[in-house]
Image: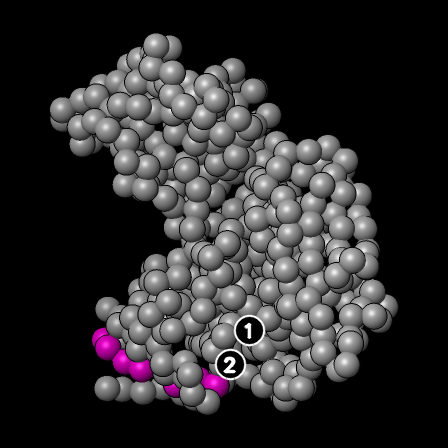
């Protein structure tokens, strides 16, 4: 097998992969970026709506425009690019990592590297995850696939559409389909509150008078060759009330029922997975349980904004550089405990002597929420948050002085985050 050697290999060429690769390559490290798609940018080229770059570039961009900012820098750099190339397996529990790859251009080959960045992004849940009864006709898509069909391939998936789930991709597709002349008849959400960010609820549903059915589920799909109708049933006290079931005639059903990190490669390499996020467990360096293997972006945890993906990836690149230079070998790290009303807190550890930035998601919808950071019974910091909801991430930073009393007998005590 042909072998190639690098300092760093980045797997995934979306927002996270490009940002981390550029940060690493700035230091003169021999870097390669690998992606199974024929183009750089990941999902961004099909996201032709605006709303990207407000935090990172201080201006509003479309997905392709946002991606192009990084693509041009990648092309001008010394980074080696492997497109149409799939990483099939990794050996990571050793000083020199090995990644086995296959490519239409390069065939089957191996890359040896001192460090790896996992930046494979996430994928959509589909009908199989929901087990909806009914036939198996044509006209059933995930929202992301429908987005690609319209924006990249130039096909309209249907004319009368029902969307299952109020995730951001589904909301954006409700607007996009309406603009193409299709009729979006309903967005059906199992939860009592929307799953997408508030901006998309307003701009993609309310502005087009598209009905949103909260606390409802699809209980049947009808149709032989093509979807003909769906049955929609309200939930009352957590159970379907079939007496109130109604039918909507349609020819297309889109699923926007959540995203999960793309971590089959990670798991097969024996890297520990965080059950709360579906991504790898990471310490304060964004390093996984395999030394020298880092993770960032949606493969680590599903983000709400791509700006945060790129920001996290740039921090990941800095941490990787410090690791290779031996600057973080002996850092002290303590455990993070996820308390009440929080889905997760990342990173999974904290460290002394510097500011620590944490990203997290709420399990509740609440105005004027309070985030409390405790060590045992002692409150270290308390934050007042204007509004929290599961669909929107939030971030806080703890200062070095916040950790003055977390060490007892040389041991770093766990710190707990809770929300009320």
Specify whether 400 is left or right of 227.
right
Dot 2 surroundings within 10 Å: few (below 14), some, or many (20 or more)? Answer: some
- Mark 1, residue position: 287
Camera-side residue of 210 and 14: 210
Horizontal arrangement in the rendering, residue 418 relative to residue 324 (left or right): right
Q: Circle 1 sits in a helix, a strand or a loop, which is it?
A: loop
Colour scheme: one colour
Residue, x 42% and y 83% (percent of image)? 93
The circle on residue 291 is 2
Q: Nearer the viewer, residue 384 or 251?
A: 384
Q: Quadrant of residue 244?
A: top left
- Nearer-the-camera pick, 36 or 400: 400
Camera sees residue 159: no
Measuring from the top left, give residue 321's x and y in whole percent: 61, 80
| Disc 1 crowd, CA 10 A, few/some/many (<14, 14-19, 20+) | many
Distance of mark 1 from mark 2, alpha carbons?
Answer: 7 Å
Q: Is residue 16 magenta?
A: no
Q: Which residues are drawn in magenta?
A: 107-114
Give the quarter of the figure containing the C terminus: top right
Name the spot of residue 101 as percent of width and height, x first. 30, 74
Q: Main structural element of the magenta stretch: helix, strand or loop?
A: strand
Please tell me which residue is depicted at 69% across the width and 50% down the height of the picture.
418
């Amino acid at each position: 097998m042909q072998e190639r050697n690098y300092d760093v290999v980045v797997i995934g060429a979306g927002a996270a992969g490009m940002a981390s690769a550029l940060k690493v390559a700035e230091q003169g490290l021999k870097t390669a970026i690998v992606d199974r798609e024929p183009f750089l940018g990941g999902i961004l080229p099909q996201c032709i709506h605006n709303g990207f770059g407000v935090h990172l570039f201080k201006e509003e961009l479309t997905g392709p425009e946002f991606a192009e900012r990084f693509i041009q820098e990648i092309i001008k750099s010394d980074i080696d690019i492997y497109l149409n190339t799939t990483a099939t397996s990794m050996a990571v529990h050793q000083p020199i990592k090995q990644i086995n790859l296959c490519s239409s251009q390069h065939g089957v080959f191996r890359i040896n590297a001192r460090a790896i960045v996992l930046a494979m992004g996430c994928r959509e849940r589909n009908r199989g995850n929901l087990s909806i009864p009914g036939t198996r006709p044509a006209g059933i898509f995930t929202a992301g696939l429908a987005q690609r069909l319209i924006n990249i391939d130039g096909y309209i998936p249907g004319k009368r559409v029902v969307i299952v789930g109020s995730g951001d991709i589904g909301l954006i597709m409700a607007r996009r389909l309406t603009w193409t002349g299709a009729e979006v008849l309903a967005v059906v959400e199992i939860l009592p509150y929307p799953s997408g960010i508030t901006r998309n609820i307003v701009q993609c549903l309310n502005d087009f008078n598209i009905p949103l059915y909260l606390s409802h589920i699809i209980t049947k799909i009808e149709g032989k060759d093509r979807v003909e109708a769906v049955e929609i049933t309200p939930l009352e006290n957590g159970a379907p009330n079939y007496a109130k079931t109604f039918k909507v005639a349609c020819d297309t059903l889109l699923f926007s029922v959540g995203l999960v990190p793309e971590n089959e490669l990670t798991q097969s390499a024996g890297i520990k997975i965080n059950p709360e996020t579906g991504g790898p467990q990471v310490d304060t360096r964004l390093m996984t349980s395999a030394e020298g293997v880092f993770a960032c972006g949606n493969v680590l945890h599903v983000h709400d904004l791509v700006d945060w993906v790129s920001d996290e990836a740039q921090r990941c690149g800095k941490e990787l550089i410090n690791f290779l230079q031996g600057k973080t070998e002996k850092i002290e790290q303590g455990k993070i405990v996820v308390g009440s009303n929080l889905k997760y807190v990342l990173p999974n550890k904290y460290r002394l002597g510097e500011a620590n930035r944490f990203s997290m998601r709420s399990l509740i919808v609440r105005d004027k929420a309070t985030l409390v950071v405790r060590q045992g019974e002692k409150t270290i910091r308390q934050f007042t948050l204007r509004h929290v909801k599961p669909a929107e991430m939030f971030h806080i930073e703890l200062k070095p002085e916040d950790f003055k009393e977390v060490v007892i007998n040389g041991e770093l005590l766990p710190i707990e985050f809770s929300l009320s």
